[in-house]
Amino acid sequence: MKRFLFLCLVFTTHLLWADLPKDLPAAIPLWPQGAPGSEARASEPEKIEGSNVCNVHNPSLTPYVPAADKSTGTAVIICPGGGHSKLCLGHEGYALAEWFRDHGIAAFVLKYRLSREPGSPYTLEGHAMDDTRRALRLVRSRAVEWHLEARRIGILGFSAGGELAAYSAMKSDAGKADSTDVIEQQSSRPDFHALIYPGKSATFTAAKDMPPVFIAAGYSDRPDISEGMADVYLKYKAAGVKAEMHIFANAGHGFGYKADAKPTAASRWPQRFTEWLTDSGLLK
């Protein structure tokens, strides 16, 4: 019996790790000297639980940048979900970033500070959004180096990460031109945003000057998402913000992206997203 339980544990652990690539690109800290409010904990190691990560005190971006001759010039920052208590980096992070890179789109997986992790000192509207806006500025500051078009840098979020993507489009700034930090000189406004089954949809607002949005969710998701996103779409429509929405009839919450997923309408949402980018003039 003990041997059986041990083999089950090994098999389960293997499955948990299956979504993560073996060789990750080196992560780039958002703040080389430590994030504001977290400097004292910057060197504290993250905790890895299967394909999830928590205990993030040194927020970072993991870059998946295509070769110069393969680059479309478009970039997307990916905000994984996890209920603000962990980051689901497998099906809502690295796998999708690889897919984007292989299709000529630069992708950057964001590890942001978690506001609902037990004992967390962080807030969503404060620390997590500081990380999100800093990520947009950082990518824009290195656009030339990464062969990107500075006006085609967007953000995409799953579930809890979708909240960050939505809030980044709702409130942004042009940067501080007089800052000695070249990153802080950059705008935090995304040029497009994608909301993949996000939470807190009732808190989303829309204004005419917001960037265009792509929305995807499952019919069988909980009502605040499956029905809430329809309300969000109507808010964007009323405000004159270009929006495209897909509600997949045979999907629920957390379908994310997996390279080996069974072919379904929901599993092929990245193709619909790139078609939308092309139709919107955001992907050459």
Image: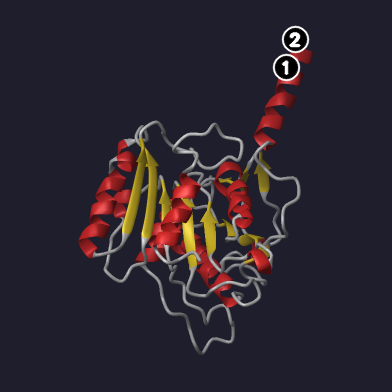
**What number is the disc on residue 181?**
none
Q: Residue furthest top?
A: 1
Disc 1 element: helix
User: Residue 276 location in percent, x, y?
Assistant: 41, 56
Q: Residue at x 53, y 50 (%)?
A: 80
Q: Residue furthest left?
A: 238
Q: Nearer the viewer, residue 58 or 23?
A: 23
| Alpha-carbon span between mark 1 and mark 2 | 6 Å
Mark 2, Cα crowd under 10 Å, few <14 / some 14-19 / many 20+, is few
Q: Residue at x 76, y 20 (%)?
A: 7
Q: Quadrant of the N terminus?
A: top right
**What number is the disc on residue 5?**
1
- Asked if the residue under mark 2 is in contact with the one under mark 1, i.e. CB atoms within 8 Å, the reply is yes
Q: Amino acid at mark 1?
A: Leu
Whether residue 225 is visible, yes or no, is yes
Q: Residue furthest right?
A: 3
Q: Residue at x 24, y 65 (%)?
A: 240
User: Residue 33 location in percent, x, y?
Assistant: 67, 72
Mark 1, Cα crowd under 10 Å, few <14 / some 14-19 / many 20+, is few
User: Residue 228 location in percent, x, y?
Assistant: 29, 45
Whether residue 58 is visible, yes or no, is no
Disc 2 element: loop
Seen in the picture, residue 66 relative to 91 is either above or below; the reply is below
**Residue beneath label 2, please?**
1
Q: Amino acid at mark 2?
A: Met
> Image check: 220 left or right of 149?
left
User: Residue 56 location in percent, x, y?
Assistant: 61, 54
> Image check: 206 left or right of 7?
left
